[in-house]
Image: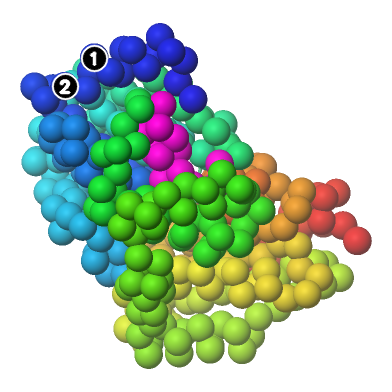
């Protein structure tokens, strides 16, 4: 948590006449949007307006969230977004640990004169003016709740705040299943339900949103899932051609990598997907126990994230990337039989 001295500073920064921007990471997920909108609604309940800016668009299954339609997508509104960032007095940086994680917005953030406040749970955060980093907490949305607690503002958690934070915690814990899910997480969830978050509505709006094309894509990749390293590593992949053929939309492949990890004995799953427009491979890693995919992805694929969930990139071909991946596995002690 922020130190008491930092909290005093932050308290004085949070006043209605200050311009406040909330930023989150590229390809925003449920926790990115949930924490950002949750903070926005909390500030609103305090009488303070804030703008949420994301680098690029986010999946349709998050667009039911209160005020999600007002989120400014920098890729589509470059001037508006860069002006807001340049003019801001305070910029909250949520659910990312480095300006390199926010695409085109990174340069604007670095140049901005605002006070920059990081709230994030990823490994190895870079310096910001104020940093609340905790890699043990499963979701940035949970950290926003802790922030509201230390501000002594739990009474301001209304239904909008509750729905957003609930969604962020639910998605980043894989439905309260991942190992960072704690008793504190469940206590906060209980409070959020008491304050108006409806678990059935949120689950259904967020997860019962499969399209036929997504299920066909899933069937395709499950049909050729490969298990290597004596049953310890699962490999999944999709080509650009397949994405086009199935009418891929943003968010359609969310969660696919977890199917790899659900195989008995598998400790690490890797999902390689050609980007629809640009010439690179987007990689998602998931793991169990002490298999550290953050380190692995940093070392070999210019990426990072958490110990058990990380992402990376490759500019090789899909086949070349998967071959390299298998060679890197050979070198790593942690995944050997
Ligand atoms: P996903 O596989 O869902 O894209 O990402 C898993 C986790 O790793 C997320 O918390 C995400 O923020 C992080 N992540 C994804 N890609 C990258 C990357 O290229 N660099 C870093 N540092 N983190 C990433
Ligand atoms: Mn997160």
Q: Say which residue label 2 marks.
A: 15
Marks 1 & 2, CB-CB < 8 Å contact: yes
Label 1: few (<14), some or many (≥20) within 10 Å?
A: few
Tell me if residue 54 is in the magenta stretch: no
Q: Say which residue label 1 marks.
A: 12
Residue 142: horizontal and vertical position, in percent? 46, 44
Point 30% across, 38% down: residue: 155
With 95 as the anchor, is 287 left or right in this view?
A: right
What's the colour scheme?
A: rainbow
With 171 as the anchor, is 23 left or right in this view?
A: left
Badge 2 marks a residue whose secondary structure is: loop
With 67 as the anchor, is 329 left or right in this view?
A: right
Badge 1 marks a residue whose secondary structure is: helix
Instruction: Find the magenta span and give its range.
Output: 137-150
Residue 38: horizontal and vertical position, in percent? 30, 46
Query: Could one spot residue 161 in this view of the protein?
Result: yes
- Ligand 2 within 8 angstroms of badge 2 C-beta: no
Question: Where, by quadrant of the figure, is residue 320 drawn?
Answer: bottom right
Query: Could one spot residue 316 in this view of the protein?
Result: no
Of residues 60 and 156, which is closer to you in this image? 156
Point 14% across, 53% down: residue: 70
Of residues 254 and 78, which is closer to you in this image? 254
In the rendered view, tell whether residue 147 sits above or below residue 260: above
Question: Where, by quadrant of the figure, is residue 36 drawn?
Answer: top left
């Amino acid at each position: 948590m922020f130190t008491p001295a930092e909290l005093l500073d932050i308290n004085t920064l949070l006043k209605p006449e200050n311009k406040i921007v909330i930023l989150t990471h590229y390809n925003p997920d449920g926790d990115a949007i949930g924490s950002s909108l949750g903070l926005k609604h909390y500030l609103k309940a305090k009488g303070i307006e804030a703008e949420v800016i994301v680098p690029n668009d986010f999946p349709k299954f998050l667009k039911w969230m209160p005020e999600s339609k007002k989120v400014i997508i920098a890729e589509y509104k470059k001037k508006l977004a860069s002006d807001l960032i340049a003019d801001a007095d305070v910029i909250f940086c949520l659910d990312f640990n480095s300006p390199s994680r926010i695409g085109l917005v990174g340069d604007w953030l670095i140049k901005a004169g605002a006070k920059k406040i990081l709230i994030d749970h990823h490994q190895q955060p870079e310096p910001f003016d104020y940093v609340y980093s905790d890699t043990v907490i499963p979701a940035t949305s949970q950290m926003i709740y802790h922030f509201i607690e230390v501000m002594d503002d739990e009474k301001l958690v209304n239904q909008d705040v509750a729905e957003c934070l609930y969604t962020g915690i639910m998605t980043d814990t894989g439905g309260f299943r991942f190992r960072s899910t704690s008793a504190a997480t469940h206590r906060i969830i209980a409070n959020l339900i008491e304050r108006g978050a409806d678990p059935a509505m949120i689950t259904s709006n967020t997860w019962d949103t499969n399209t036929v094309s997504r299920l066909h894509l899933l069937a395709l990749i499950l049909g050729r899932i490969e298990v290597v390293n004596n049953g310890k590593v699962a490999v999944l992949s999709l080509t650009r051609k397949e994405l086009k053929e199935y009418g891929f939309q943003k968010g359609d492949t969310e969660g696919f990598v977890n199917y790899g990890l659900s195989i008995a004995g598998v400790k690490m799953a890797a999902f390689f997907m050609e980007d629809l427009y640009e010439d690179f491979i987007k990689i998602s890693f998931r793991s169990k126990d002490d298999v550290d995919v953050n380190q692995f992805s940093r070392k070999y694929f210019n990426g990072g994230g958490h110990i058990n969930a990380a992402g990376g990139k490759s500019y090789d071909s899909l086949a070349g990337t998967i071959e390299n991946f298998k060679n890197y596995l050979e070198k790593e002690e942690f995944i050997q039989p």
